[in-house]
Amino acid sequence: MGEITPTAAAAMMLIRTPRLRRRPGNTSSRDETGPVGVDDAYRLCEQIMRTQARNFSYGLRLLPAPKRRALSAIYALARRIDDIADGNAPAGQRQARLSALRATLDVTAPAPHDPVLVALRDATHRYPIPIEAFADLIDGCTADVHGTTYRTFEDLLGYCKCVAGSIGRLSLGVFGTADVRAATPLADALGVALQITNILRDLREDRLAGRVYLPERDLRRFGCTLVIDERGRFADPPDRLAALVRFEADRARGWFATGTRLLPMLDPRSAACTATMALIYRRLLDRISADPAGALAARLSLTTREKTMVAVGALAQAGRGRGR
């Protein structure tokens, strides 16, 4: 490892937190005897983010406390939406819960007993968060509930913008930028890159759950069916699967190239946060592309040390940029 600069050393102290095991989501609304205070609400959201966000949390630790708190509220509600869609309840019940949750997006309505909504509504008063983007996220998760498949990449693109681009747009409201109109499609593009990476990382896991995200046209192009055999492995010829995975990885790289054009449009700490998340996923994508067979056999991830060093580098780069 190279020399640790003062900026990097400070980043190590900022980032180094106890490693926590992911626990089942606990983001449902609560009905307490009294209203939830804003500080307590934010503390719960930050706990959800620390214990469940995995890659997302590494970037958030680089932000000033007010922005970190606001983004933890965004994450907590997004986590709740995702937990509903991925739950074990019948599809009709999950659909009903998502529809009910959509009705809570009115930030002018009181929510004294729901800490996630209390925190989120406070955040919307502090930052121009485009709350309507949560409706896009709900639309994408609704597609998951119904097991929607995608004929072409253009079809999949709409889904990616719903489930991942929406988070980029919500985050952009907290980060702030001088040109929202120019920055918004770049945030969408970065979300698309992250989501394609997720799809490739979780290809086998999703297939075992009955979900297929890769476009039907791409499957036909490479002669793949994604059928799972009796051993729980893909029955397609490995060389065809590898070619398919590398094709989709190359597509994701193009979206990363577009999305990272957002970084110069952000303040240094927000840029460091965004760069950390992008670099973690880009390195994961490169690992998947280098070893498709390994990625299809087991869920790949970067180590805690690797993620930490990515964040250190991003913050150090932001510090150098500020000094110019």
Image: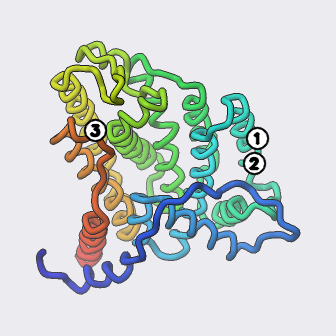
Q: Secondary structure at mark 2?
A: helix
For the residues labelled 1 and 3, the Cα–Cα distance comes to 38 Å
Residue 91, x across and y down, in percent? 66, 29
Pointer 3 residue: 297
- State the residue in front, 118 or 174: 118
Task: Give the class, few, some or many, for how many residues have Cα within 10 Å of label 1's Cα (few <14, many ≥20).
Answer: few
Q: Is residue 124 above or below residue 79?
A: below
Task: Give the class, few, some or many, for how many residues have Cα within 10 Å of label 2's Cα (few <14, many ≥20).
Answer: few
* Discs 2, 1 touching: Cβ within 8 Å: yes
> Which residue is painted at 68% across and 61% down in the image?
116
Q: Residue furthest right?
A: 33
Q: Residue furthest left?
A: 2
Amino acid found under the numbered disc labelled 3: Ala
Amino acid found under the numbered disc labelled 1: Ala
Q: Going from the N terminus, do you reach mark 2 or mark 3 first? A: 2
* Discs 1, 3 touching: Cβ within 8 Å: no
* Discs 2, 3 touching: Cβ within 8 Å: no
Q: Is residue 320 above or below residue 76?
A: below
> Which residue is painted at 40% across and 41% down in the image?
195
Q: Is residue 185 above or below residue 315?
A: above
Figure quadrant of the C terminus: bottom left
Q: Secondary structure at mark 3?
A: helix
Q: Going from the N terminus, do you reach mark 1 or mark 3 first? A: 1
State which mark lies toward you, 2 or 1: 1
Pointer 1 residue: 100
Pointer 2 residue: 104
For the residues labelled 2 and 3, the Cα–Cα distance comes to 40 Å
